[in-house]
Amino acid sequence: MLLTVLYLIAGLLLLLAGGNYLVEGGVSIATRLKMSPLLIGMTIVAFGTSAPELLVSLKSAVIGNSGIALGNVIGSNIVNIGFILGLTAIISPIITQRKSITYNGLVMIASVCLFMLFACTRESLSRTEGFVMFAALVAFLVVSVFIEKKGHRQEESKSAQTDMPIWIACFVVVGSCFALSYGADLLIDSATKLAKAMNVSDRVIGLTIVSVGTSLPELAASLIAAIKKQMDISIGNIIGSNIFNILCVLGVSSAVAPIQVDWSIYLKDSLYMAGFSIMLVAFTIKSGKLGRLGGLILLAAYVYYTKTLFF
């Protein structure tokens, strides 16, 4: 048991380190392309910090562990908004571009609705539905880049500035991917063993230990961005990660190996995921600001949700 716990901790540490260095290398590349802070947060940072979710869910789906694959994504999206954004806003209120955050927030809600539509109509996410979700992600990225160029919003983030040469940045990205892959292996194996030893369901393990562990890169990136007053990167990272988690993580995973969905078990968790997404948009749609009160409400809602998993 002790060895399993040590493997679990090692997996989480590798995911955290790999995710952080992947973000650093990715932002270095993005900065040289003169992308705005919000788009950097929505794409490079978001996708980099969501790489652990992709690897964990993909590996879980391939070995037939749908409980962890699905619970990881739903749990991570809830953790991202309820815990990470809630905590970040309490530390430092998040102010960003109202129109952009509203648009991206609505896309996030739409992706949640698309997943729930596919999940409730069948007993699994099929390969076809996986391809549809991934195609929706590609469309979202194309539109985002088009809006970026049309608006000529090519602001450079001071915190994103780096002297890292492009070849080193590419090397860091590749190395981080290997660290994330190995960390994902350790995390899945140890979490599964712990679940069996403690008679805890895969659903609860996926929604708590695995989802929080794979969300550590998002937590680090958002907190650091908020402390450095780069709010666009902070909130863009979370919204982009949530969109990526559903459309890419579940999309790619189900395209490779259809994911079984027991809707009677995951309905409540999916509704919570939708509720957190709607709350975030509701708090920011008028002013483009997520204040300390909104952050406190999100964090309190997350604590309540976690309590319902165990009691």
Image: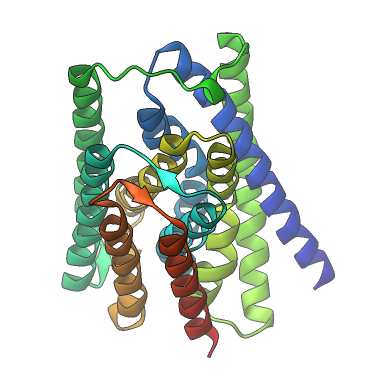
Q: Quadrant of residue 145?
A: top left
Q: Is residue 212 left or right of residue 261?
A: right
- Counting every numbered tag in the picture gives 0
Across and down, in percent, residue 46 comes to: 44, 39
Query: Quarter holding the N terminus?
Result: bottom right
Q: Quadrant of residue 161?
A: top right
| Residue 151 in view, yes or no | yes
Q: Residue at x 57, y 61 (%)?
A: 212
Seen in the picture, residue 68 relative to 225 is either above or below; the reply is below
Looking at the picture, the colour scheme in use is: rainbow
Most extreme residue toward the bottom, as rendered?
311
| Residue 262 in view, yes or no | no
Across and down, in percent, residue 98 comes to: 26, 41
Name the foreground residue: 105 vs 252.
105
Most extreme residue toward the right, as rendered?
2
Seen in the picture, residue 33 relative to 127 is either above or below; the reply is above
Name the foreground residue: 310 vs 59.
310
Across and down, in percent, residue 96 comes to: 36, 39
Name the foreground residue: 76 vs 226.
226
Q: Residue at x 30, y 46 (%)?
A: 288
Across and down, in percent, residue 116 comes to: 23, 66
Q: Residue at x 26, y 43 (%)?
A: 104
Q: Residue at x 30, y 52 (%)?
A: 284
Name the foreground residue: 60 vs 75.
75
